[in-house]
C-alpha cells in the first residue's frame, strides 16, 4: 500500500491499494503486459502500479475504460493503521 503523495507519514489517515485491479485482471484472464498494451500506459507506469506507487487519475481512467469498470473496482482507499486513527465502517459520509 502507498501513502498519499508517495510518502510514508504516520499522520496520513488513508492509504491506497490496487489489489482490486490485480484481482480483476485475474478474473478477466488478462496479463499485466496485456493491460499495458490495451491501455497504452508505459512500462514505468505499470511498474508503479505493481509497486503500489502513485499514478495519475488519467491512468486509472484509461484502465477503467478498457476494463469496462469503475474506479472503485480497481482501487481502494483504506485506513492507515500507522496513523493511530480508527475506521468506523458504519459511519455515513
Image (tube, helix red, strand yellow):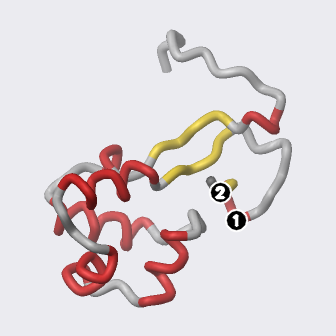
Q: Examine the rendered structure and indicate whether residue 49 appears above or below residue 75.
A: below
Closer to the camera, 30 or 41? 30
Name which quarter of the figure residue 29 lies in.
bottom left
Q: Examine the rendered structure and indicate whether residue 86 appears above or below residue 14.
A: above
Name which quarter of the figure residue 6 lies in.
bottom right
Going 81% across and 38% down the picture, which residue do you hit? Answer: 82
Q: Position of residue 61 (x, y in %)?
A: 30, 65
User: In terms of secondary structure, where does tag 1 sit?
Assistant: helix
Going 45% across and 51% down the picture, which residue do you hit? Answer: 19
- Image side of residue 60 versus residue 82, left or right: left
Q: Position of residue 91 (x, y in %)?
A: 53, 12
User: In terms of secondary structure, where does tag 2 sit?
Assistant: strand
Q: Where is residue 41 in the image (x, y as percent from the top left)?
A: 35, 84
Q: Examine the rendered structure and indicate whether residue 93 appears above or below residue 83.
A: above
- Image side of residue 26 versus residue 28, left or right: right
Neighbor class of circle 2 (other Cα within 10 Å; few <14, some 14-19, many 20+) is some
Q: Where is residue 64 in the image (x, y as percent from the top left)?
A: 25, 61
The label shown at residue 2 is 2
Closer to the camera, 66 or 51? 51
Going 33% across and 75% down the picture, which residue do you hit? Answer: 32
Marks 1 and 2 in Cβ contact (< 8 Å): yes
- Image side of residue 68 versus residue 23, left or right: left
Neighbor class of circle 1 (other Cα within 10 Å; few <14, some 14-19, many 20+) is few
Between the C-alphas of marks 1 and 2, the distance is 6 Å
The residue under label 1 is 6
Amino acid at each position: 500500500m502507498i501513502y498519499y503523495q508517495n510518502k510514508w507519514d504516520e499522520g496520513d489517515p488513508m492509504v491506497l491499494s490496487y489489489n482490486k485491479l490485480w484481482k480483476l485482471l485475474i478474473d478477466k484472464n488478462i496479463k499485466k503486459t496485456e493491460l499495458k498494451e490495451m491501455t497504452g500506459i508505459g512500462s514505468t507506469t505499470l511498474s508503479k502500479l505493481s509497486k503500489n506507487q502513485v499514478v495519475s487519475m488519467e491512468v486509472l481512467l484509461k484502465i477503467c475504460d478498457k476494463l469496462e469498470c469503475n474506479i472503485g473496482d480497481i482501487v481502494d482507499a483504506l485506513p492507515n493503521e500507522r496513523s493511530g486513527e480508527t475506521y468506523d465502517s458504519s459511519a455515513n459520509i
